[in-house]
Amino acid sequence: MWIYQNDPFTEEMIGDNVGFVYLITNNTTGMMYIGKKLFTKSKIYQKNKRKRRKRVASNWEEYTGSNSILNEDIEQGHNISKEILVLCSSKGWMSYHETLEILSRGALQDDKYYNNWISCRIQASHLK
């Protein structure tokens, strides 16, 4: 279950937001992971012999991050908590806030974070 501002986050709270930046904490080891997740994903289907795309719900409710070491710890039964740090109205804002959180916390240099790399491309026009 995702927590946002100390309350459980539900689908009704999404509003106009496209995704969020999150912090997953491994309560067993104290390690943390910062990431981002979209509420929807693109699905390709075929109609009249043409490929079409549409947005469908993603697995955001069960999502546990893309870090393989974190997911191995979860499979081994470690207790985790999932917190939404920022709700974002665009993909650009998601990238911006994820990068800001990782850099301001020093997550790449700190051994208490699972984060070990960052890839970010943000255009100023995407933040307006």
Image: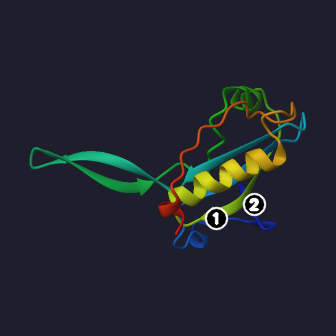
Please state if 5 lies on the left or on the right of 62 as rendered. right
Frontmost residue, 105 versus 5: 105
In what element is the residue under mark 2?
A: strand
Crowding near the residue tagged with mark 1, few <14, some 14–19, many ≥20 C-alpha atoms within 10 Å: many
**Residue ID at (67%, 48%):** 99
Q: Quadrant of the N terminus?
A: bottom right
Identify whether 83 is placed above or below 26. Answer: below
In what element is the residue under mark 1?
A: strand
**Residue ID at (58%, 50%):** 37
The extreme front residue here reads: 124
- The residue singled out by tag 2 in the image is 3
**Residue ID at (62%, 58%):** 20
Mark number, residue 87:
1
Q: What x and y, as percent, mark residue 48? A: 9, 49
Identify whether 19 is placed above or below 5. Answer: above
Please state if 35 lies on the left or on the right of 41 as rendered. right
The extreme left residue here reads: 48
Q: What x and y, as percent, mark residue 65? A: 65, 40
Mark number, residue 56:
none
Total tally of numbered discs in the picture: 2
**Residue ID at (90%, 33%):** 29
Q: What x and y, as percent, mark residue 23? A: 75, 49
Residue 60 visible from this viewpoint = no
The amino acid marked with disc number 1 is: Leu
Give the CA distance from mark 2 to mark 1.
12 Å
